[in-house]
Amino acid sequence: MATTSFLSSLKYSDGLTVVGISFCTAIVCEAISWVLIYRTNSYKSLRSSIDKAAKKLETMKTDPAIKIAKKSKTKKIDRVETSLKESSRDLSLFKFKSGAVVALVLFVVFGLLNSLFEGKVVAKLPFKPFGLVMKMSHRGLQGEDSTDCSMAFLYFLCSISIRTNLQKFLGFSPPRGASSGLFPMPDPKTN
C-alpha cells in the first residue's frame, strides 16, 4: 500500500507504470517463447543448420583461395543459399506457432492498460510530433497540446524497444543468416 501511494505521488507515475508493465510483459512473452520454442531440440537443430549454412556461404563468397570453376562455384553457392532460405522459412514457421500465444498476451495487457489509462496523459514528448506520429501519440486524449503522449504510443514504443533488446540480451535474437520472416525478398536471379 505504501508503494502505491509513493508511486502516485511521483510526477511521472503513469508513464513509469506503463514502462514497468511493458517490461514485465516482455519478460512474460520471452518466457512463453522459451517454453514453446527456444528450449526444443527442433529449434536448436534449425538454428545450428542456419548458422552453418551462413558461415559456409560467407566463406564461399569471400575466400579467394577456393579455386573452383566459376559455373561450379555459382551452383554450389546457389545450393547453399537455397538451403539457408529453406531453413530460415522453417524457423519462421516454427516461431509462428508461439506468436499467436504471445499476441494474445499482448492484446490482453493492452486492453487492460487501455481501460486503466483511457484519456490520461502518461508522458510529455520533448518535441512536437509531425502528422502521423501526432495522431498516434495523441490517440484518445482531449486537448490541443501535441506534446501530450497517450498510453498506447508509450506502450508501443516500449514494447518494441524492450522486447528486442531483451531478446538480444537473452541470446534469442534470430541467427545471422536467417531471412526476415515468412515472406523474404524475392531473389533477383530467378527473374
Image: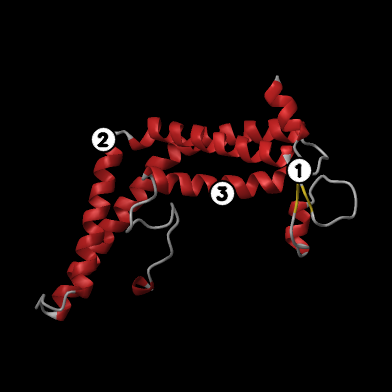
Give how far across and how far down residue 55 sits, in percent: 22, 61
Whole-number angstrom distance, CA of label 2 to CA of label 1 = 43 Å
For the point 26% across and 35% down, the residue is: 41
Q: Which of labels 2 and 3 is toward the front?
A: 3
Q: Nearer the viewer, residue 143 or 56?
A: 143
* Residue at the farthest top position: 1
Q: Amino acid at mark 3?
A: Ile
- Residue at the disc numbered 3: 160
Give how far across and how far down residue 64 sits, in percent: 15, 79
Tell me if 92 is positioned left or right of 145 in this view.
left
Q: Earlier in the sequence, mark 2 or mark 3?
A: 2
Q: How is the image coloured?
A: secondary structure
Q: Earlier in the sequence, mark 2 or mark 1?
A: 2
| Local SS, label 3 | helix
Q: Earlier in the sequence, mark 3 or mark 1?
A: 1
Q: Amino acid at mark 2?
A: Asn
For the point 70% across and 34% down, the residue is: 113
Q: Which of labels 3 and 1 is toward the front?
A: 1
| Local SS, label 2 | helix
Give how far across and how far down residue 30 sits, in percent: 46, 37
Whole-number angstrom distance, CA of label 3 to CA of label 1 = 18 Å
Label 2 Cα neighbours within 10 Å, binned few <14 / some 14-19 / many ≥20: few
- Residue at the disc numbered 2: 41
Q: Quadrant of residue 23?
A: top right
Q: Is residue 20 above or below residue 130?
A: above
- Which circle marks residue 122 in the picture? 1
Q: Nearer the viewer, residue 85 or 129?
A: 129
Q: Which of labels 2 and 1 is toward the front?
A: 1
* Labels 2 and 3 touching (C-beta < 8 A): no
Label 1 Cα neighbours within 10 Å, binned few <14 / some 14-19 / many ≥20: many
Q: Amino acid at mark 1?
A: Val
Tell me if 112 is positioned left or right of 172 in this view.
right
